[in-house]
């Protein structure tokens, strides 16, 4: 564990062997956090097992903790999470997963996957372009 890394609720962290945690990382185990063997968590990575967004949206910040949502988060073995990246609460990352820098992971990732937020954005842009083309073709048919 490198300098300035922080573990919230360390008593709820289940950590495998040979895990490397980079400088400035924040690991929130308040909802339960499990990290498998031989995993590397990069610089300034944030791994969350709770979310207080509902508390803020309801105007309850600082009043009580009833609206805070806690969910177990799991990172498998032999993973590499490049920083800075954020992993949302309740996410399960499979074994052998690589996550590219500047990612926000808010869904489960299967074993052996490579998560590249830029590629996902590119795929979304490609799908939008196809839909726009199909819409244009439909408009042309209606006019004719």
Image (spheres, rainbow, N blue to C red):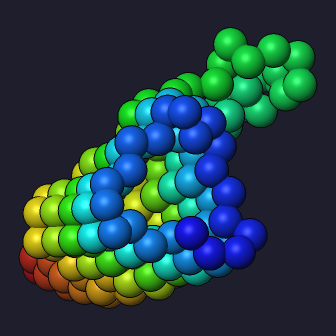
Of the 4 image quadrants, the one containing the N terminus is bottom right
| Viewer-proximal residue among 11 and 120 | 11
Q: Residue 79 location in percent, x, y?
A: 27, 71
133 left or right, relative to 61: left
Q: Is residue 83 above or below residue 93?
A: below
Asked where in the image residue 16 lies, by quadrant, the reply is bottom left
Q: How many marks?
A: 0
92 left or right, relative to 61: left
Instruction: Report if residue 110 is visible in the image.
Output: yes
Q: Residue 111 location in percent, x, y?
A: 11, 63
Which residue is situated farthest in the right direction here? 62
Asked where in the image residue 133 lies, by quadrant, the reply is bottom left
Q: Residue 130 location in percent, x, y?
A: 19, 82
56 left or right, relative to 25: right
Asked where in the image residue 80 lies, by quadrant, the reply is bottom left
Q: Give the residue at x 81% y 15%.
A: 64
| Viewer-proximal residue among 4 and 73 | 4
Q: Is residue 129 above or below residue 96?
A: below
Q: Residue 120 location in percent, x, y?
A: 30, 77
Which residue is situated farthest in the front direction here? 17
Q: Give the residue at x 68% y 57%.
A: 6
């Amino acid at each position: 564990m490198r300098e300035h890394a922080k573990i919230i609720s360390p008593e709820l962290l289940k950590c495998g062997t040979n895990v490397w945690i980079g400088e400035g990382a924040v690991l929130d185990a308040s909802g339960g956090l499990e990290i498998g063997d031989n995993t590397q968590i990069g610089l300034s990575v944030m791994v969350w097992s709770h979310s207080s967004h509902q508390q803020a949206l309801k105007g309850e910040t600082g009043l009580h903790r009833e609206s805070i949502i806690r969910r177990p988060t799991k990172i498998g073995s032999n993973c590499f999470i490049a920083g800075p990246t954020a992993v949302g609460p309740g996410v399960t990352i499979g074994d052998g997963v690589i996550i590219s820098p500047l990612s926000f992971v808010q869904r489960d990732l299967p074993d052996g996957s490579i998560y590249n937020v830029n590629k996902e954005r590119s795929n979304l842009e490609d799908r939008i372009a196809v839909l726009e083309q199909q819409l244009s073709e439909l408009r042309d048919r209606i006019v004719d």
